[in-house]
Image (cartoon, helix red, strand yellow):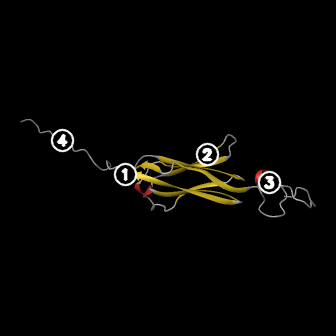
Amino acid sequence: YQANLGQTSCEQCPNGTSTITTGSTSVNDCGGPPVVTVFEPNPTNATENQATQFECYGTGLPLPTFSIKKLVPPPAGFGGPVKQEYITDQEGRQTGLRYIITKVAEKDAGAYNCTVENKFGSDTKYLTVNVALDYSIGKRRRRRRRLAAP
């Protein structure tokens, strides 16, 4: 990058980073592609009608955006309710994303990906969710009839 107007030589970006294009004018233009550092647990073993969660962490300069998606989404109404929470460091910078299925359904089983992205590129990792079915659902205990005494 060239910090001063009319400069004929370039300043080196810090820590092995680089700029995307020539003509950059600030150290703030320096960066590098992000990396998914952790996406776990893999595999995630979940039980139907219970909650489960997995987390994705990544790094990059500038800080990347995070997304977690199921590769083949379940049909509407067949997957469990999902919420996502940002994971931040002490300075409030996002370092990860937590994916929570609050009530696992059979159709939640499958492959998921975590992608981190910034202006220098992206990185993706995958994990598998296995769902153990709860066969006790729908079964009712039989009530015993008491016969009235004559």
* Mark 3 to mark 4 CA distance (whole Å): 76 Å
The local secondary structure at tag 1 comes to: loop
Outermost residue toward the left in this view: 150
Rendered residue at 64%/44% (across/down): 88
Q: CA distance from mark 1 to mark 2?
A: 30 Å
Q: Earlier in the sequence, mark 3 or mark 1?
A: 3
Instruction: Please name the residue shown 48% across and 55% down the image.
Output: 128
Q: Nearer the viewer, residue 42 or 25?
A: 42
Q: Earlier in the sequence, mark 2 or mark 4?
A: 2
**Residue, x 65% and y 59% (percent of image)?**
122
Tell me the kind of residue under disc 2.
Ile
Name the side, left or right, on which 93 lies relative to 148.
right
* Element type at mark 2: strand
Disc number for residue 144? 4
Q: Are marks 3 and 2 in contact (CB under 8 Å)?
A: no
Distance in Å between CA atoms under marks 3 and 2: 24 Å
Residue on which the image places disc 3: 28
**Where 91 falls versus 13 (above or below)?**
above
Q: Which residue is mark 1?
A: 133
Q: Nearer the viewer, mark 2 or mark 4?
A: 2
> Whole-Å distance between the Cαs marked 1 and 4?
29 Å
Residue 87's tag is 2
**Helix or strand or loop: what does disc 4 sit on?**
loop
